[in-house]
Amino acid sequence: MTTTPGRAPVEADIERVLVSADAIARRVAELAEELGRGLATDGADDEGIVLMPVMTGSMLFVSDLVRQLPHKLRLELALVSSYPGTAQQSQGAKLTMPLPTGLEGRHIVLVDDILDSGGTIRFLQKELAKQAPASLRTIVLLRKPRPDAADVPCEHVGFEIPDEFVVGYGLDFDGLYRNLPYIGTLRPKSAE
Ligand code: IMP
Ligand code: MG
C-alpha cells in the first residue's frame, strides 16, 4: 500500500475534488424538497411511492435522499451493470437481476448517480413504462454535458459536471473509491 502522508489510502489517487461533501449535503436537502413538490404534482399518495435506486452507484445518494423525504415510501432496487471493471465508456446497460414487478399504478422515482451517455436511464425508463406506473420521474446526482444524455427525460439534477471520469460518493473505478465522501477525479495513472 502506498500512501501520501496525511491522506487516507482511498484519497491517495484523487487528483481534484469536484463536489465537496458539504456541497453534496446541501444539494441533497434541496433535491428532496424539489422531489417532494414533483411528487405532489404527480398526485402521488404515500402508499404508492416507490424509490428505485440503480445499484450500486446510487447507494450513498439514495440513502441520504430518503432520510430527507417525509413520505411513506418503498425502496425497490434496479440492478444494472454498464461499466464493468475498469471500463470508462459505457458498455451498454444490462440487468443483472430482473426488475421488480407489480409496479402498475405506482409512482416510481428512478434514482441514479450520474447521467453520462444516458443509456442506462433510457433503458430503465423504457422497461418500467411497460408496467404502466401512474408516474415515472428520474433524479440523478450528476449529469455530464453529453448530447445524447440531453434527450433523456430527467426531472431532477443535482450538479452539472464537466465530461470527466469521476469517483466517490458511490461512483467507482473498478469497484473502488465508492466510500469517498466527495466527488473527485482520479490521477491519470490510477485510471490506466
Ligand atoms: P450511462 O448509461 O452512460 O448514462 O452511464 C450511467 C452509469 O455509468 C452510471 O450509473 C454510473 O454507474 C456509470 N458512470 C458513468 N459515468 C461515470 C463516471 O464518471 N464515473 C463512474 N461511473 C460512471
Ligand atoms: Mg450506475
Image (cartoon, rainbow, N blue to C red):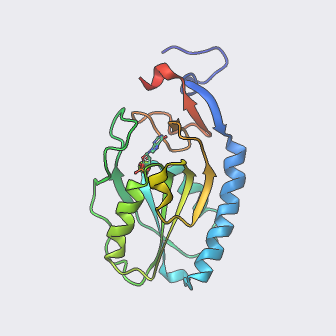
Is residue 189 toward the left or the right of residue 102 in the image?
right
Residue 1 rendering spot, x and y as whole percentages: 48, 15
Where does the C terminus fall, quadrant-wise? top left
Determine if residue 79 is in view: yes
Comparing 147 with 158, the one in front is 147
Residue closest to the far front: 147
Q: Is residue 151 above or below residue 147?
A: below
> Considering only vertical position in the picture, is 141 above or below 50?
above
Nearer the observer, 112 or 61: 112
Numbered-mark total: 0
> Which residue occupies 38% across, 55% down?
120
> In this image, 118 relative to 4: left or right?
left
Q: Could you say where residue 150 lies in the image, as x and y percent from the top left?
A: 50, 57
Horizontally, residue 119 falls left or right of residue 96, namely right
Instruction: Say which residue appears at 36% left-offset and 44% top-offset.
Output: 90
Can residue 56 be seen here?
Answer: no
Instruction: Pinpoint residue 99: horizontal percent, then vertical percent.
Output: 31, 65
Quick check: 25 above or below 187?
Answer: below
Left or right of residue 149: residue 67 = right
Residue at 69% over, 55% down: 27
Identify the residue at image location x=65%, y=75%. Answer: 37
